[in-house]
Image (cartoon, rainbow, N blue to C red):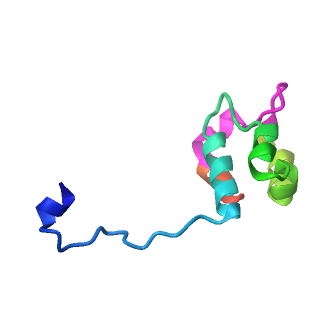
Amino acid sequence: QYERKTGGKRFPAASIVRKQTNLEEQQNYLIFGLRQLEEGIDPSAFEMRFGITLEKAFCKPLERLLRQKAIHFQPNGNLVINRELAFVSNQIFVEFI
């Protein structure tokens, strides 16, 4: 359909595609996982997927955000955002980039 509409002469707006780096994949996994306010991130699933612990991959931002109580570990071990700070979640996510 795209080719028909453009007569096959125009290229998509994003014609250059690059593979994400491992760090970018980890950051995206963390950010999208933390958006799930109830479930959050399972640290063991993170480690199985990336071969590194969550704590090792994001040591400094984790320490800082845990100390600020912006994030916390649930009794089941999952990492979640403090619900009271969900409205500023993007500011929290920036810490991991």
Q: Residue at x 82, y 49 (%)?
A: 54
State the count of labels: 0
Residue 94 in the image: state x and y as whole percent.
65, 59
Front residue of 89/39: it is 39
- Locate the C terminus by quadrant: bottom right
Left or right relative to 7: residue 58: right
Q: Residue at x 13, y 60 (%)?
A: 4
Residue 75 in the image: state x and y as whole percent.
85, 25
Vertical order, 34 against 22 (above or below):
above
Q: Residue at x 60, y 40 (%)?
A: 35
Front residue of 85/20: it is 20
Left or right relative to 63: residue 6: left
Is 50 covered by the magenta stretch? no
- Locate the N terminus by quadrant: bottom left
Residue that lies at the very extreme toward the top in this rendered image? 75
Q: Quadrant of residue 22?
A: bottom right
Is 84 covered by the magenta stretch? yes
Magenta span: 72-89
Q: Quadrant of residue 79?
A: top right
Residue 62 in the image: state x and y as whole percent.
82, 51
